[in-house]
Amino acid sequence: MPHLRLTLRLLAMITTLLIALPLHGIWRLVRAPSPWPRLFLGTVARIVGARARIVGTPRRRDVVFVSNHLSWIDILLLAGASGSAFVAKAELRGVPVVGWLCTLNHTIFVSREDRLRVADQIDRIRAALIAAWPVTIFPEGTTGDGRTLLPFKAALLAVLDPPPAGTLVQPVRIDYGTATDELAWVGDEHGQSHALRVLRRRGTFVATLTFLDAFDPLDHPGRKAIAAEARRRIEAA
């Protein structure tokens, strides 16, 4: 049964992609904002078993979402709920299919090791915000176990020091409930192994996305202060 479940979910994902891609292309041809990356990623979240429960209201523009991070499923859920673009590790661009799909959703690839290009990376994040794309940052810098909130890496919030005009920070807490221990991606587990384990998992699970009140980063000058305030609010939630 686990192998059948894996096969059926992969077929459902491929079918969804084949439907969404040409529709996305049509929207692009007429230069209209395309909802299809958001709808595709949200649908894939349901295919892998997630049932999103949204608490609060995600802002649609002029916002940087700052979220805890448990798994690659977070990206599907947040994109489906908000249409957000993401700041992701540069290595992800080279992953077959996944890297290409990321580009459709305006993913901004960054390399923390390439210090010479930090300014360019910040400029690309700013450009996304100016173009009215909400952007999500996972300031823990890695996935956690869902029980403990890891320290926030303030360097990832450099785009907010100073922030683009009118941009707010909206903290988000993601919680997989009773399925957390099964789904959190921790330790040395290979990404492919984790993905296969999730796709073979039986049943569904409720993923609660709590969109907390947004705050003005100008009220907390400096990226360290912004990171501390976002972490405080997520931890309190």
Image: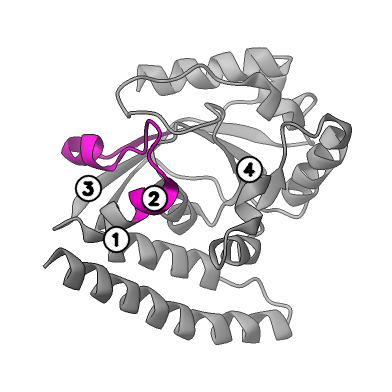
Q: Residue at x 20, y 41 (%)?
A: 179
Q: Residue at x 55, y 68 (%)?
A: 97
Which residues, given as a range, are shown in magenta? 173-195
In primary-sequence order, the first of circles 1 and 4 is 1
* Amino acid type at mark 1: Val
Question: Could you tell me how far apart the alpha carbons at marks 1 and 2 are, in whole angstroms?
Answer: 8 Å
Mark 1 closeness class: few <14, some 14–19, many ≥20 residues within 10 Å: many
In which quadrant of the rendered view does residue 158 lie?
top right
Colour setup of the view = one colour
Indicate the secondary structure of the residue bearing disc 3.
strand
> Do tag 1 and tag 2 residues touch (Cβ < 8 Å)?
yes
Mark 3 closeness class: few <14, some 14–19, many ≥20 residues within 10 Å: some
Along the line of sight, the residue nearer the viewer: 78 or 71: 71
Residue 173 at what x, y percent from top left?
39, 32
Foreground mark, 3 or 4, reads: 4
Mark 2 closeness class: few <14, some 14–19, many ≥20 residues within 10 Å: many
Foreground mark, 4 or 2, reads: 4
Q: Residue at x 40, y 29 (%)?
A: 144
- Say which residue label 2 marks: 73
Indicate the secondary structure of the residue bearing disc 2.
helix
Mark linked to residue 89: 4
Question: Could you tell me how far apart the alpha carbons at marks 4 and 2 are, in whole angstroms?
Answer: 16 Å
Residue 2 at what x, y percent from top left?
16, 64
* Amino acid type at mark 2: Ile
Along the line of sight, the residue nearer the viewer: 94 or 48: 94
Along the line of sight, the residue nearer the viewer: 29 or 176: 176
- Say which residue label 3 marks: 206
Residue 40 at what x, y percent from top left?
45, 70
Relative to 67, residue 43 above or below: below
Mark linked to residue 48: 1
> Do tag 1 and tag 4 residues touch (Cβ < 8 Å)?
no
